[in-house]
């Protein structure tokens, strides 16, 4: 690894030393804006290798029509120099950390849950473009294959029992995506072959269709006759917000999360591929 690649991306010699050669630098305007905000939080810019990984990630998301714009709240939970920088949002408002400390953060591995800590996204269902269009996406490792925990979501019993949860529950266990109102309806569920790393995601694209994914592959699709309703509760990550309290905090390690508008199978696979390449490139850069 060259010395130039270890320099902050905005260093005068970040592009290479005169007469010795050059190296790529980030160019995407949205990526540069994100990197500048991470720098402000960290106190120094990330290395060239990390910055170009982020730049390529933004480019990959934009290469699939509708994918980048569907991301309404999101963080890259690795690569930044500090946990403060890792909580700078790629999109949406900055999440509020509840219980996480600097020791929970690894620049390559992400943020590791401890079974009690969680992130409050400070975003509610108003961030969705339509009541029947939404996605949840997490990328990480150490996903449990038994027990009850939640990746993200909310449950609001005061709003006609609005449900929006991506989680795993015992007995079974089963991994499921519940999206709707009331407690009825059919929801995507898987009961075996759980992925323990990579991505777990879910998407609703209509009032009658919702899908659950592992590593970008559609593992189940189900119909439901219930339509998600509005709620003032905010979404949690690493747990589910049930009537204002965190329930089912996971001790998984997350490197990236996103909540936003609904994605189809092609977009979700592209999302997984882009996130995989991002995490791999950050690991190689550091």
Image: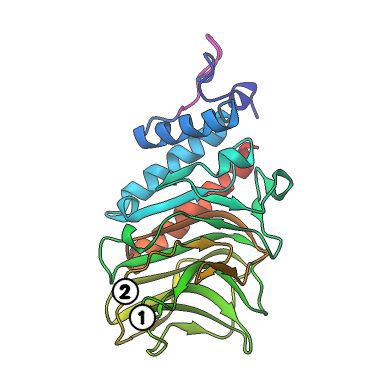
Label annotation for residue 160: 1
> Residue at (57%, 24%) from the top-left corner?
8
- Tag 1: Cα neighbours inside 10 Å, few (<14), some, or many (≥20)? some
Disc 2 packing (10 Å; few <14; some 14–19; many ≥20): many
Farthest-out residue, front: 158
Residue 108 coordinates in the image, percent (x, y): 65, 45
Would residue 23 be counted in the magenta stretch?
yes
Left or right, residue 30 beside residue 118: left
Q: Nearer the viewer, residue 171 or 26?
A: 171
Q: Position of residue 217 (x, y in %)?
A: 45, 71
Up the image or down, 158 lies above or below 261; here it is: below
CB contact under 8 Å: marks 1 and 2: yes
Nearest-to-viewer mark from 1 and 2? 1
Q: Which residues are magenta?
A: 16-25
SS state under label 2: loop
Q: Which residue is mark 2?
A: 229
Instruction: Between residue 261 and residue 27, name the one nearer to us.
Output: 261
């Amino acid at each position: 690894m060259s010395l130039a690649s270890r320099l902050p991306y905005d260093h005068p010699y970040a592009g290479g030393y005169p007469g010795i050669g050059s190296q790529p630098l980030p160019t995407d305007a949205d990526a540069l804006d994100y990197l500048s905000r991470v720098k402000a939080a960290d106190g120094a810019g990330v290395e060239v290798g990390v910055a170009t990984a982020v730049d390529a990630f933004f480019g990959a998301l934009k290469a699939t029509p509708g994918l980048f714009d569907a991301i309404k709240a999101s963080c890259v939970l690795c690569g930044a120099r500090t946990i403060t920088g890792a909580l700078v949002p790629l999109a949406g408002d900055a999440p509020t950390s509840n219980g996480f400390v600097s020791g929970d953060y690894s620049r390559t591995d992400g943020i590791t849950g401890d079974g009690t800590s969680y992130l409050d996204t400070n975003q509610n269902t108003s961030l969705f473009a339509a009541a029947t269009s939404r996605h949840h996406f997490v990328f990480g490792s150490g996903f449990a294959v038994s027990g009850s925990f939640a990746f993200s979501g909310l449950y609001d019993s005061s709003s006609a029992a609005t449900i929006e949860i991506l989680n795993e529950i015992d007995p079974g266990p089963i991994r499921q995506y519940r999206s709707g109102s009331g407690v009825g309806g059919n929801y995507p569920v898987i009961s075996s072959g759980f992925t323990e790393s990579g991505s777990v995601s879910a998407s609703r694209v209509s009032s009658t269709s919702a899908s659950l994914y592992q590593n970008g592959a559609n593992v189940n699709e189900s119909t439901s006759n219930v339509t998600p309703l509005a709620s003032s509760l905010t979404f949690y990550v690493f747990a589910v917000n049930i009537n204002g309290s965190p329930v089912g905090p996971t001790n998984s390690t997350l490197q990236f999360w996103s909540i936003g508008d609904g994605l189809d199978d092609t977009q979700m696979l592209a999302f997984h591929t882009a996130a995989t390449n991002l995490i791999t490139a950050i690991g190689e850069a550091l």
